[in-house]
Image: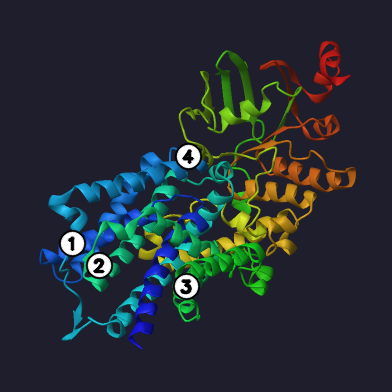
Amino acid sequence: MEYVMHILVMVCMYAVLAISFNLLIGFAGLFALSQAVFFAIGAYATGLAAVAGLPFPMPEILAVLIGGIVGVLIALPALRTRGDYLVIVTLALQIVVLQVILNWKSLTGGTEGVRGIPGLSFFGVALSDPSHFLIYAAIVTALVFVFAWKVGHSPFGRAMKAMRENESAAQAVGKNLLYLKVSTFAVSAALAALAGSMFARYYNYVSVDSFSINETIYILAMVIVGGIGNLWGSVIGAAVLVALPELLKFLDMPTDIADQMRLVIYGVILILVLRFRPQGILPEPRGALHDGEETASAGGNASSLVVGDGSSKGEIVVDAKGLVKRFGGITAVSGFDIEMRAGQITGLIGPNGAGKTTAFNMLTGFLQPNEGSITLRGNSLLGLKPHRIVGAGVARSFQDLRLFRNMTVLDNVLVSLPDQAGDDLGQVFLRPAKVSRQEHENLARAMEVLRFVELDGKANETVNALSYAEEKLLVIARLLATGAEVMLFDEPLSGLDPTTLAEILPVIRKLADNGKVVCIIEHNLDVIKELSDVVYFLDEGRAMAVGTPEQVMTDPELAARYFK
């Protein structure tokens, strides 16, 4: 029985580690290979503090704080890299930290480790055997699960998933990627450190051998087998991978090949799971994440999102002068001026490579101009990050849509709504009533936005289930949800048939009629004629002509260059 209790203790410990890792790679999409580092930090911090005489729970609190702080310190430089580079950087970090632990003998004991770590005792009962320690381990695991569930199913968690799906699109709806990444890294590191604290208290001994890169890979396997993006999957993955090797010990095999055969069987089982269940035992829940009746009947006032900021029609809202953007020896935009006015639709046309999208990127902070100025109602936008510019009132779409494809239609809109208290991880826990109340209000506002573009019937479907025309409408809805007064559309109507165009054109026109500032890049000249109040013709990074659609399209020189 003690043996079974020991296995359950290990399941709890690794469930905490898998949950912490799943938040990082499953929810936030930050593929880092350094989880064993934070596991080690928590174990050593707890062991050293307990040996020094600090009473429970001070060593545990210290371990969590140190783990979180180290996570932040590691995240700041590491997150300047992405993808494969982040894997390499964090893998190198793991090697460096373990070498520091190994060689800092005066503190860590080097190869000898930290011995004689005091065990836990409550109400005179020492948790010195697995059956007693299991109670503590189960309580800690349950608390960690509830905490992680709260994080993952809050507006902050929704923003994490948006960042995972597409970082630039998350910025374009006003999300602060640096805050999201550092906060997620800190939380993940702190929870892994708590697992390390459990390890130190259970074994009363800590050595560097327990925290190798193999440990990180082991935890990663639990997340993958259980299901990336699913916290219950992390628990199940930990249970399967901890218990499976132990169960294989009961197979009757020749003693000389038993260990090797168990490893082979273990590997084959993992391969079969990944081959026939690549999404994991419990895949990430998608689809109807919100109550269907509630979302269908939710009423709300989204007029502030649909209507402009009250500017007089024709008033200049955005004024850009002398924009220049160079990439090495290539000048993509040269001396470009543009004015955008309230209640009007401005069209940008020109051949491929003319600098239209580069101009959008400068107007929205994704690129900083080498020269020139950009003002919004007289306030400079230069130097602001994209999410700050969205907050100021200028938002954009992308030519390749960049929707959050594995999220629901409703969540694509919800994540885009501005000023969400739940985007702040601190408020998720310190002001839960406010976050919950605002979430209900935002649900109603998001449904109103979807009604505006007639996608309310698709609210609980994932983006992957939409038609191309519906995806285009969702782009408009997501941009509208930001509450931005100035809306920049990059080829919003490309690839649509005439029937669908007839459905979407009035939606864009209605935005301008409601006082929004609209600017569109479009190659379909019929669309430009029907929608635009003023047209800028760009070529070779310069505005070669500005005027009404009729004036620009009847210019003989421009007609020879582009229209014929």
The disc placed on residue 114 is 1
Mark 4 residue type = Tyr
Asked if 353 appears above or below 174 in the picture, the reply is above
Disc 2 element: helix
Disc 3 element: helix
Marks 1 and 2, the one that precedes in the sequence: 1
Disc 4 element: helix
Of tags 1 and 3, which is closer to the observer?
Answer: 3
- How many residues crowd around disc 4 within 10 Å: few (fewer than 14), some, or many (20 or more)? some
Q: Which residue is mark 3?
A: 258
Q: Which residue is mark 4?
A: 85
Instruction: Estimate the spatial distance between the alpha carbons at disc 4 and disc 2, rounded to whole Å.
Output: 32 Å
The residue at the point 31 percent across, 44 percent down is 96
Marks 4 and 1, the one that precedes in the sequence: 4
Marks 3 and 4, the one that precedes in the sequence: 4
User: Are the two marked residues, 2 and 3, in contact with CB atoms closer than 8 angstroms?
Assistant: no
Which sits in the foreground, 332 or 192? 192
Residue 148 position by quadrant? bottom left
Instruction: Estimate the spatial distance between the alpha carbons at disc 1 and disc 3, rounded to whole Å.
Output: 33 Å
Instruction: Estimate the spatial distance between the alpha carbons at disc 3 and disc 4, rounded to whole Å.
Output: 39 Å
Residue 337 position by quadrant? top right
Mark 3 residue type = Ala
The disc placed on residue 200 is 2
User: Residue 328: x and y, percent?
Assistant: 55, 16
Residue 464 position by quadrant? bottom right
